[in-house]
Image: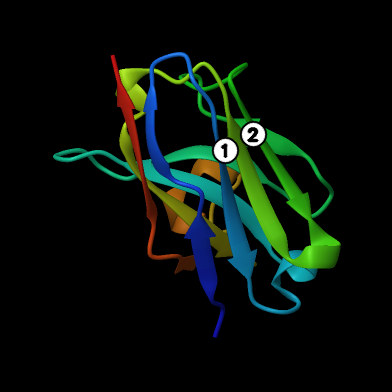
Amino acid sequence: QVQLVESGGGSVQAGGSLRLSCAASRFVQNTYYMGWFRQAPGKEREGVAGIANDGSTSYADSVKGRFTVSRDNAKNTLFLQMNSLKPEDTAMYYCAAGRYPSALGPRWLLARGNFGYFGQGTQVTVSS
């Protein structure tokens, strides 16, 4: 069983920054690709950023240039640095892990169906 625990959410004004962290179960970081998803009220969960085992990354167009995903395999931790936050970034953010993608393509790291494990989420609220 893979366990993921997010932290670092909070409330911030537009233009501010937050750094999310995700503590993963032992060995997950070495054998799983990881990602961040978010879900706003009334909307579907969407992929925000993903990072593969080789370090390659993928970002949603809405966050490209503002968010950075990274991983520290030695500490089994995934990060999401969020800068220049906007009110539309307000959502519950979820850490995710997967091992065997069912669908490939240029945005496979953002596809919800490719991830079998999700954390409980951390709330991010951006005020204008």
Q: Looking at the picture, how far across and down is residue 33, in whole percent? A: 68, 57
- Give the label on residue 71, or none: none
Q: Disc 2 versus disc 1: distance between alpha carbons?
A: 6 Å
Question: Disc 2 marks which amino acid?
Answer: Ser
- Give the label on residue 49, or none: 1
Identified at 53% across, 69% down, the residue is: 4
- Picture quarter containing residue 59? top right
Please say if 51 is above or below 84. Answer: below
Residue 57 visible in the picture:
yes
Q: Secondary structure at mark 1?
A: strand
Q: Decide which of tag 2 and tag 1 comes sooner along the chain.
A: 1
112 or 7: which is nearer to us? 7
Relative to 61, 127 lies left or right: left
Q: Looking at the picture, how far across and down is residue 75, in whole percent? A: 79, 65
Relative to 17, 86 lies left or right: left
- Picture quarter containing residue 32? bottom right
Q: Looking at the picture, how far across and down is residue 114, in whole percent? A: 52, 57
Question: Disc 1 marks which amino acid?
Answer: Ala
Residue farthest along the bottom direction in this orientation: 1
Q: Secondary structure at mark 2?
A: strand
Which residue matches tag 2?
58
Q: Residues within 10 Å of mark 2 (few under 14, many from 20)?
A: many
Q: Residues within 10 Å of mark 1 (few under 14, many from 20)?
A: many
Pointer 2 with pointer 1, Cβ within 8 A: yes
Identified at 66% across, 54% down, the residue is: 78
Residue 115 visible in the picture:
no
